[in-house]
Amino acid sequence: MYTYRCIGPEEINVVRAMFDHDLSLVDVDLTPSQIDEWCVNTMKGIVAGIRACVIAFDENNEPTAMTIGTEYTQSKAWYKGISKIRKPNNYYPTTARIMGPAEDMLIQYMEDRGNFKYWSATFEGKYHTTRNNILRKHSTMFARYDGFDEMIVPPGQEAGIKIWDMNRRPHPFSDILIRMYVLKQEYRIPLVRQQREKLNIEIVTH
């Protein structure tokens, strides 16, 4: 049984623990100093209130999986950062069962803040489609989104778009697909109406 929660800015050691079995991000091994830098920057975003990091904890309260999102209030959108399993398992249907509820919590967090679209970056090709099809079976929130390809970034290059490049390193050996996910209209309508009512209440009370 797993429990899930957004961690606080004082829990940097929880994030560091995610690297004690596997030093990689997006199939690229990091040095200890790079890992430390990445962890510190992640926590800075949490402190600033623009980033959420959802951790899955096992029955021994050990961190098992992690997913991260960064909010862009000016664009009413967010960027889906790293998803990482502490002890890698190449059989994605197994890890998706753990990661799915974490993705649900992250998406719910962002929707509660009025963000109904986001970008992600991952390997281009069949892997992306296969992974998403499996994840939709385990994440009811993710299944409510449609995906649209925005750009394929060649190995070693930046995208040239600030909000994408500031959240990812150029990948040394793989094309990276930037994809936008948009909440389907039937789910947007009630949320947008709720936003309108909230704005009206705030205007009246002020």
Image (cartoon, helix red, strand yellow):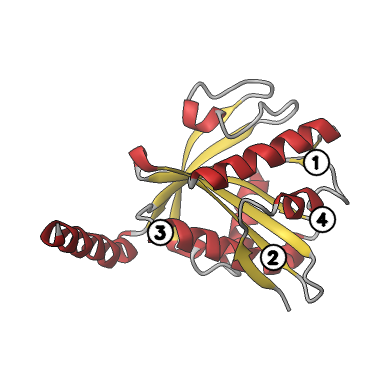
Q: Is residue 202 left or right of residue 91?
A: left
Hey, which quadrant is residue 124 in on the image?
top right
Q: Amino acid at mark 3?
A: Glu
**Mark sitting earlier along the chain (1/3):** 1
Contact between labelled residues 1 and 2, with CB atoms less than 8 Å apart: no
Choose mark 3 or mark 4, whichever is in front: 3
Q: CA distance from mark 1 to mark 3?
A: 29 Å
Measured from the top left, where is residue 186 in percent x and y?
A: 30, 65
Q: Amino acid at mark 1?
A: Ser
Q: Which mark is residue 24?
A: 1
Q: How many marks?
A: 4
**Mark sitting earlier along the chain (3/4):** 4
Q: Residue furthest right?
A: 21
Q: Nearer the viewer, residue 175 or 1?
A: 1
Q: CA distance from mark 2 to mark 4?
A: 18 Å
Measured from the top left, where is residue 147 in percent x and y?
A: 46, 49
Q: Is residue 71 left or right of residue 5?
A: left
Q: Which mark is residue 56?
A: 2
Q: Which mark is residue 90?
A: 4
Looking at the image, residue 174 lies above or below residue 19: above
Q: Which mark is residue 111?
A: 3
SS at circle 4:
loop
SS at circle 2:
strand
Measured from the top left, where is residue 194 in percent x and y?
A: 25, 65
